[in-house]
Image: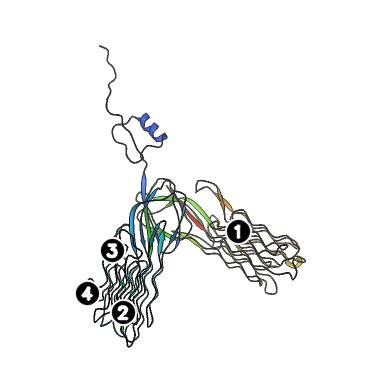
Amino acid sequence: MQRGNGAVIGKQNTPTTSVATGVWALNEVQRAVLGGIWPRLSFTVVQTFTASGTWTCPAGVTEVEYLVVAGGGGGGGGNNSLGAGGGGGAGGFRTGTGLSVTAGTDYTITVGGGGSGGSGGSGTNGSNSVFSTITSAGGGTGGGVSGNGSAGGSGGGGAYLAAGGAGNTPSTSPSQGNNGSGWDGGKSGGGGGASEAGGTDAAGEGGDGTATSISGTSVTYAGGGGGGGGGLTPGGTGGGGASTGTGTQAVAGTANTGGGGGGGGELAFPGAAGGSGIVILKYNVAAQTVFTFKSSTKWTCPTGVASVDYLVVAGGGGGGGANGGGGGAGGFRTGTGFSVTAGTEYTITVGGGGSGGGAGQIDGTSGSNSVFSTITSAGGGGGGKTGVNQSAGQSGGSGGGGGDNQPGGSGNTPSTSPSQGNNGGSGAGSSAAPNYGSGGGGGAVASGGNGTSTVGGSGGAGTASSISGSSVTYAGGGGGGVSSGGTAGTGGAGGGGAAGNPSTATAGTSGTTNRGGGGGGGTFASTPGNPATAGGAGGSGIVIIKLN
């Protein structure tokens, strides 16, 4: 008897990018993958900002979970005749899930600072923290010298005979904070906290904050500061500072918790500062996702990730003033298969560019280092100055160009393998007249050019990287300056700035932001009086990580 192949007849399976249930033939899986509708391996990422910066939304990310806590208010100051100060209110506390974001967009992150404590009067409110459309308001300051507490994310406590400030100001839903309490006959009021009003647990105590596990562990934020008067008054849980009583200093709110500062005791003791805020983002990404860090932050390695590719570029050096040397590029380091540990929080440091030297023949300053894990790229060396006190270019990731007859700075300092940069060019030397060209800053792939009697040295070229998904050149050196009648040095490919143009009396061009380029040297212009111009600032660095 002839036999046919068996089959299973049932409802057709329909996959999504998150789930595919049922029994699948290999050709069905292949079609779904090619159609972009098969589930992808994903990782959960936590990124923490303890200072203001920029978050670049990775490809494929459409929504985030967030925590935004503002700076806490300062505690009010005590007064000899009018009693103790009120506790500062906690910074506003806002958290949520499913906030829409757009891949590839740079979002400005603002982390609010804590308010200052009062001295013989009220202090100041904390500053707002902001991410996208979410703003948490700074905590209200505690009152001083019979003053009311101020309104804010949570309100400050009132001083002698005074009322507490209103919380949840401006109003949000859910509420971002609570009211401060007023004077109760023996103590000044406590600042409000994220989860309760000041004075809820006891007279003058700061209101407690709220716990969240967005970072992976439970942490409490946004506690109110304790009010002064009659001995120790605790702050609220979540970083609220205590008022320690007559004759002793109040306690500041804890940094990066948004806690309010403690109120000052009698005998004119000042109130304490509020704690700074924090912003934390949590989101899911696919394998091979690229993270671009344009400012310093903290990044928690996702579970399941054991290695990454990286690019770490430091800040470029500033160009020397007048016809000074070009700034050296920031160190350029890249690699693949770099081991990381899942669950570890890594501090990402993005180095800033050095400042350009002033017009009065002043050296440029070196850029700052960029760091990821054990990988440190050194800031580019500043360009040397010209004139009687002429100087060599400074050493760094790539060296700065030398002024007049001075040598360029050494690149690849400190030494790495592969090399992170190259030497700066030398000035024109004893035959520098008539235009006294200074050396160009070194770049990631080439040394800076030497200056001549008529032309400033060109900046060394940078290196291209495709880690971001497209080819981008980083770490070009700045062009060397030249005096009136000469030709300004060109900036190196990769964000290096050109030297100032003597015919138009322009300053040196700054290195490109987030490329680590060196700044161009200034110039002595050809216009009447031969005015000198400043060197350009170095460009800030960048850190890019790609998951393996």
Q: Amino acid at mark 4?
A: Ala
**Eye-nearest disc, 3 or 1:** 3
Task: Report the front residue among 45 and 66.
Answer: 66
| Mark-to-mark CA distance, 3 and 1 | 51 Å
Q: Looking at the image, which residue sits at the far left? A: 201
Mark sitting on residue 210: 3
Q: Earlier in the sequence, mark 2 or mark 1?
A: 2
- Picture quarter with the N terminus: top left
Q: Is residue 374 magenta?
A: no
Q: Name the residue carrying label 2.
A: 159
Name the residue located 29 percent from the left edge and 77 percent from the top edge: 227
Name the residue located 35 percent from the left edge and 83 percent from the top edge: 269
| Mark-to-mark CA distance, 4 and 1 | 65 Å
Q: Name the residue carrying label 1.
A: 422
Rendered location of residue 341, percent (x, y):
37, 54
| Mark-to-mark CA distance, 3 and 2 | 25 Å
Q: Relative to residue 348, is residue 231 depicted above or below?
A: below
Task: Report the front residue among 81 and 313.
Answer: 81
Q: Amino acid at mark 3?
A: Thr
Q: Amino acid at mark 1?
A: Asn
Q: Amino acid at mark 2?
A: Ala
Q: Is residue 191 magenta?
A: yes
User: Does the CB distance between marks 3 and 1 fall below 8 Å?
Assistant: no
**Eye-nearest disc, 4 or 1:** 4
**Residue range highlighted in magenta:** 181-205
